[in-house]
Image: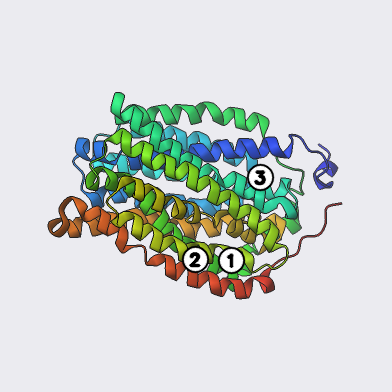
């Protein structure tokens, strides 16, 4: 077969970039649906399987993050060397299959192992998606495109919370897992049929040489490490709070499962959607003038997030709690567009998925692996003193981490202009 078509400039746009973005967004929504459904189902799962807060925290974070983090880099490398769209489609099928199997678990160990499988599947989804978006969208539109893709986080979190609550209340928690898994299994072949890679020089010697230079390259760039560890500390709080706040509402405010689902779902959908979109829009506008805004934006957001979360968690009126938590639910994930865009520009285009995989390894191992487990462990330790409110105070205890995340972003802003790789205009 002739090799010349793979070396041409990316002129053949099939499918349309917006269609690709829409398909990637839906896959990312499924990704977070499968993650967040566990949070709203915490109480019925704990009661059914007899779990402590620490055990559930391990299932909600550590079990998922262990293999998710470590498989992310090799699967990103595979995507850079072969087909990014193919790796994503396979990942959707694998994580959806394991999500469905979670509905059959009868013990802590079974559910822990099945969540490991979900993590392996989801490891192949995000980093290749970042790279595919960077292939389809020019630099001046890239932060907004990545922000639209990142809307999968609040939409998936919010929808997973609401749908999970209704299914668990009217049927049972096992059906919720099975239903979410089946949707993903059916979507995977449709994704593979519609989404195609942009033409690129697949497998050339120079391309492989560049690939194996990724890790030494990012190892020398301080901005990469500062962005990665700053985002991971923010994710430690964000993932932990997303998993546990529904249980705080049930325990400390005597809300029903459906009430907690509606309350948290509305916060995540409204606040999160605004925050993610604003982050991408502001990054495109401000980042073209000064690269440091890609780090300054999340820094400012996190400095506001922590005190507002604290005020919301300490309030007694549910209306006041909702109003106070709305803003930090927006600012908490405003970083997604700016930071993921900056990571794409620290390396050359052939290295993007692999660099994103390295970033996600750090972000998810610390953020997702530690956050839910840490809050659950603190809650168990405080149980004798605070009773049902132990989870509320455990959530408050981790909020100070946001200030350390903001400090790292301040340092990242100083290094980012020097580490930025300018992209040659498309032919």
Q: Position of residue 309 (x, y in %)?
A: 38, 57
Q: Quadrant of residue 335?
A: bottom right
Q: What SS does tag 3 mark? A: loop
Q: Position of residue 172 (x, y in %)?
A: 29, 27
Tell which residue pokes out farthest to the top in this image. Answer: 171
Q: Which residue position holds label 1?
A: 295
Q: Which residue position holds label 2?
A: 230
Residue at 26% across, 58% down:
393
Instruction: Give how far apart the Cα atoms at labels 2 and 1 are.
Output: 9 Å
Callout 1 touching callout 3 (CB < 8 Å): no
Residue at 43% across, 30% down:
180
Q: Residues within 10 Å of mark 2 (few under 14, many from 20)?
A: many
Q: Residues within 10 Å of mark 1 (few under 14, many from 20)?
A: many
- 64 on left or right of 247: right
Tag in front: 1 or 3 = 1
Q: What SS does tag 2 mark? A: helix
Tag in front: 2 or 3 = 2
Q: Residues within 10 Å of mark 3 (few under 14, many from 20)?
A: some
Q: What SS does tag 1 mark? A: helix
Q: Name the mark on residue 177.
A: none
- 288 on left or right of 115: right
Q: Is residue 389 above or below residue 178?
A: below
Q: Tell me which numbered mark, 2 or 1, is placed earlier along the sequence.
A: 2
Q: Tell me which numbered mark, 2 or 3, is placed earlier along the sequence.
A: 3
Q: Which residue position holds label 3?
A: 82
Instruction: Give how far apart the Cα atoms at labels 2 and 3 are.
Output: 31 Å
Q: Is residue 347 visible?
A: no
Callout 2 touching callout 3 (CB < 8 Å): no
Callout 2 touching callout 1 (CB < 8 Å): yes
- 149 on left or right of 70: right
């Amino acid at each position: 077969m002739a090799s010349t078509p793979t070396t041409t400039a990316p002129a053949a746009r099939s499918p349309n970039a917006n269609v690709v973005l829409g398909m990637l967004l839906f896959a990312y929504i499924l990704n977070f649906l499968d993650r967040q459904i566990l949070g709203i189902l915490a109480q019925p799962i704990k009661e059914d399987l007899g779990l402590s807060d620490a055990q559930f925290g391990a299932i909600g974070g550590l079990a998922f993050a262990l293999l998710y983090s470590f498989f992310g880099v090799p699967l990103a490398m595979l995507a850079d060397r072969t087909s990014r769209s193919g790796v994503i489609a396979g990942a959707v099928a694998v994580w959806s299959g394991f999500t469905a199997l979670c509905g059959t678990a009868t013990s802590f160990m079974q559910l822990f192992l099945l969540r490991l499988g979900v993590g392996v599947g989801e490891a192949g989804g995000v980093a290749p998606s970042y790279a595919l978006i960077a292939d389809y969208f020019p630099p001046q539109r890239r932060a907004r495109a990545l922000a639209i893709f990142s809307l999968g986080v609040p939409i998936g979190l919010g929808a997973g919370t609401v749908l999970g609550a209704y299914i668990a209340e009217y049927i049972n928690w096992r059906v919720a897992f099975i239903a979410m898994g089946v949707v993903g299994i059916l979507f995977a072949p449709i994704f593979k049929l519609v989404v195609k890679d942009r033409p690129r020089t697949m497998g050339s010697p120079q391309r492989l040489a560049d690939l194996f230079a990724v890790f030494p390259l990012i190892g020398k760039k301080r901005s990469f490490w500062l962005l990665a560890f700053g985002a991971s500390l923010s994710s430690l709080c964000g993932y932990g709070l997303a998993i546990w706040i529904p249980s705080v509402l049930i325990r400390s405010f005597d809300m029903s499962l459906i009430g907690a689902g509606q309350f948290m779902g509305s916060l995540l959908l409204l606040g999160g959607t605004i925050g993610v979109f604003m982050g991408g829009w502001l990054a495109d506008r401000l980042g073209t003038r000064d690269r440091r805004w890609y780090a300054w934006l999340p820094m400012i957001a996190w400095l506001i997030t922590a005190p507002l979360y604290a005020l919301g968690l300490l309030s007694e009126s549910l209306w006041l709690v909702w109003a106070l938590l709305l803003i930090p639910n927006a600012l908490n994930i405003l970083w997604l567009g700016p930071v993921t865009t900056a990571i794409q520009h620290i390396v050359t285009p052939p290295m993007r998925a692999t660099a994103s995989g390295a970033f996600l390894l750090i972000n998810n191992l610390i953020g997702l692996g530690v956050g839910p487990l840490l809050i659950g462990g603190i809650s168990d330790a405080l149980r004798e003193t605070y009773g049902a409110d132990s989870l509320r105070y455990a959530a408050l205890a981790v909020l100070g981490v946001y200030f350390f995340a903001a400090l790292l972003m301040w340092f990242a802003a100083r290094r980012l202009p020097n580490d930025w790789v300018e992209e040659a205009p498309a032919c």
